[in-house]
Amino acid sequence: MATTADLSHAARELLDRSFWSQVGLDMPMTAMLLEERRVTTKGGLQLWYHLGKDDAEDEAQDYLPGDILTVGQAEFINTAKFNWKYIQVPMRYGIDVHLQNQLATSETKRRDLVSLLVERAEDGMKRRIEKRMHAVTAAGDTGAGLQGLPEAYDHSRTYGEITSNTTTVAYWNGASLADSYTDRATADPLSLDNLRKIKAIVKRYADKRDKLYVFLPEGLHSKLQGMCEGSAHYVAGTKENSLLKYGFDAFHVYGMEVVCDSYMTLNSMTDDMLVVNPKYWHFRVHPDRNLKVNEFFHQAKVAGGKDEWIAHAYLCAAAICFKPRTGMWKSALV
């Protein structure tokens, strides 16, 4: 007969082995971060990023010989601080299920049941990560949920304990099509002209060689694909050069990879576009909570406990963008 130690070992082995291959690659957002090697496993109490928030142009002086030279230096360093976010998925193995699986070959049945529990935990963790990475409602720096792309690329919000605005802290906003840092929700057409402008704007503060991904729901993805097909700037995805190898529908236009993101549709983001430069993202996973599972514990061992076994899968992570104006969120495309 399998023991609770067997259950724990099977669950832990299955979860640890299958997280990145089964959970992460089921969604294009995480597939992108993995493909671009933006997923890291590191610890720490809080995640800090030191930012050079402006250049020295404002300190430059035009002068004539004999003029008094100005002396001064503006404060040009700021620090973004990100907190860990925690997710857990419980797994319950009740006495009724335990007894129903008590057959002559119960060892096989028991492990089949554990596999089912683990698959459910994987699916629950995947759906929660998907939901948070696409969430249009901000989780906040001190909230419990992962902070996703819309929160990172929004305008005039607090992110990484820095509050952005349209003037002195404009550098901490997501990119703006109108350069106003107030037009995230402004109705703009999905057009090739605007796509060229968006590319120029999000690369303004980035390396021109950086790769850009454009995430669109099915409706907008099909609309843009229809505009581009038959044109010289359209390149269909291939197994060698795109996320298509993971099963996602993708094509290239103006050097950007346009990916169909079904979760945007499921999350009612039917008029939205997310333009991402993965170079300026980190998905940090704490090594002590990288989907580790505690041992199945029989609750009857404690006063008031039920006749059942309980375990939890834990994830401690942070999705961090440390240069928001290299990406864009548009929420009212027409």
Image (cartoon, rainbow, N blue to C red):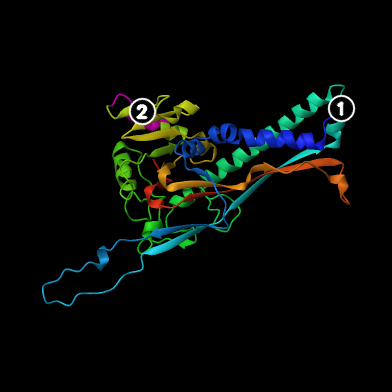
Quarter holding residue 10: top right
Which disc number belongs to residue 73? none
Label 1, label 2: how far apart the Cα atoms are: 58 Å
Q: Is residue 34 above or below residue 318?
A: above
**In this rendering, would 103 be left or right of 121?**
right
In the rendered image, the quadrant that contains the C terminus is top left
Q: If you read the primary sequence from the N terminus, does the residue marked by circle 1 or circle 2 appear first?
A: 1
Where in the figure is residue 123, as x and y percent of width and height? 64, 35
**In this rendering, would 111 be left or right of 301?**
left
Question: What residue sits 81% from the left and 40% below the top?
Answer: 309
Q: Name the one closer to the observer, 88 or 56.
A: 56
Which disc number belongs to residue 102? 1
Where in the figure is residue 228, as x and y percent of width and height? 32, 29
Question: What residue sits 49% from the left and 41% below the top?
Answer: 269
In the rendered image, the quadrant that contains the N terminus is top right
Secondary structure at numbered mark 1: loop
User: Furthest residue to the left?
Assistant: 65
Q: Is residue 223 magenta?
A: yes
Secondary structure at numbered mark 2: helix
Q: Name the one closer to the observer, 277 or 188.
A: 277
**In this rendering, would 54 be left or right of 282?**
left
Q: Is residue 75 above or below residue 35?
A: below
Q: Which residue is mark 2?
A: 226
**In this rendering, would 179 be left or right of 127?**
left
Q: Looking at numbered disc 1 in the image, what kind of residue is underneath it?
A: Gln
Q: Looking at numbered disc 2 in the image, what kind of residue is underneath it?
A: Gly
Q: Name the one closer to the observer, 13 or 264.
A: 13
At label 1, counting other C-alpha atoms closer than 10 Å, the crowd grade (few under 14, some 14-19, many 20 or more) is: few
Q: Which residues are magenta?
A: 222-231
Where in the figure is residue 5, as x and y percent of width and height? 79, 37
Q: Is residue 266 magenta?
A: no
Q: Nearer the viewer, mark 1 or mark 2?
A: 1
